[in-house]
Amino acid sequence: DIQMTQSPASLSASLGETVSIECLASEGISNDLAWYQQKSGKSPQLLISAASRLHDGVPSRFSGSGSGTRYSLKISGMQPEDEADYFCQQSHKFPLTFGSGTKLEIK
Amino acid sequence: EVQLVESGGGLVQPGRSLKLSCLVSGFTFSDYGMHWIRQTPGKGLEWVASVSSRDIYIYYADAVKGRFTISRDSAKNTLDLLMTSLRSEDTALYYCARLKTVGIRSYFDYWGRGAMVTVSS
């Protein structure tokens, strides 16, 4: 199975600050990576697919990058509504696997 | 509007069975792969099972293989998950999710709100 190591587990940021979350895959996943945002009590929502493709309606302050085994999600200018949990997920091989999540809070 | 609505969750004793259903609307059901994914505070998000578009492929996580069965009824627009020989570690919030495939890339573009399953005596 492909293990997805996500870091940090938690993060606090001030409004307007730029934050980054990383996922390291245990083997190359050829950009078959998505990022999801999950707000408290809600189901996950797609932010980014194919490592860097912004999903329809997602604010442009969100961006994704990476290749091979290393991927990152960046939020350029933290907003109050960005307080949430964030997960990465690989779809390169079954079983599909998720990162353990990053809890992002406002400082 | 795409909608996925899970039902069938509840409290069940270890060793017993439970069936979850996901009623979908707003898209051509048979054109999409459909998945069950569960979430717990301790283990996070865990993929459980999937059925591909046109029901060509079915896959299960090792943790549920031989105990869970995924199926779809395209006439009723429902995705089911029959869970047997339930264990305490199956306690989780179960989501159904639609897999969107664009070229060689796939991702979950719609999720239901989830159905809570608690396995306890």
Image: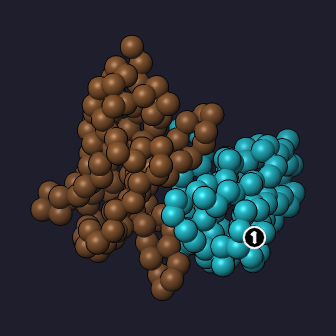
Chain colours: A cyan, B brown
Q: Position of residue A105 (x, y in %)?
A: 77, 43
Q: Determine the residue positioned at 51% across, 68% down.
A: B107
Q: Determine the residue positioned at 53% across, 78% down.
A: B105
Q: Determine the residue positioned at 26% across, 38% down.
A: B19
Mark 1 lies on a secondary structure that is loop
Closest to the observer: A65 or A42?
A65
Q: Residues within 10 Å of mark 1 (few under 14, many from 20)?
A: some
Instruction: Name the quadrant containing residue B8.
Output: top left
Closest to the observer: B110 or B117?
B117
Q: Position of residue A89 (x, y in %)?
A: 61, 61
When the figure is inspected, residue A38 is found, relative to residue A62, above or below; the finding is above
Q: Determine the residue positioned at 70% across, 73% down.
A: A28
Chain of the residue displaying label 1: A
Q: Quadrant of the C terminus of chain A?
A: top right
Instruction: Name the quadrant containing residue B15.
Output: top left
Residue farthest to the front, as pictured = B66
Q: Is residue A48 visible?
A: no
When the figure is inspected, residue B17 is found, relative to residue A11, above or below; the finding is above
When the figure is inspected, residue A13 is found, relative to residue B116, above or below; the finding is below
Residue farthest to the top, as pictured = B121
What residue is pinned by disc 1? Answer: A69
Q: Position of residue B26 (x, y in %)?
A: 28, 65
The amino acid beneath tag 1 is Thr
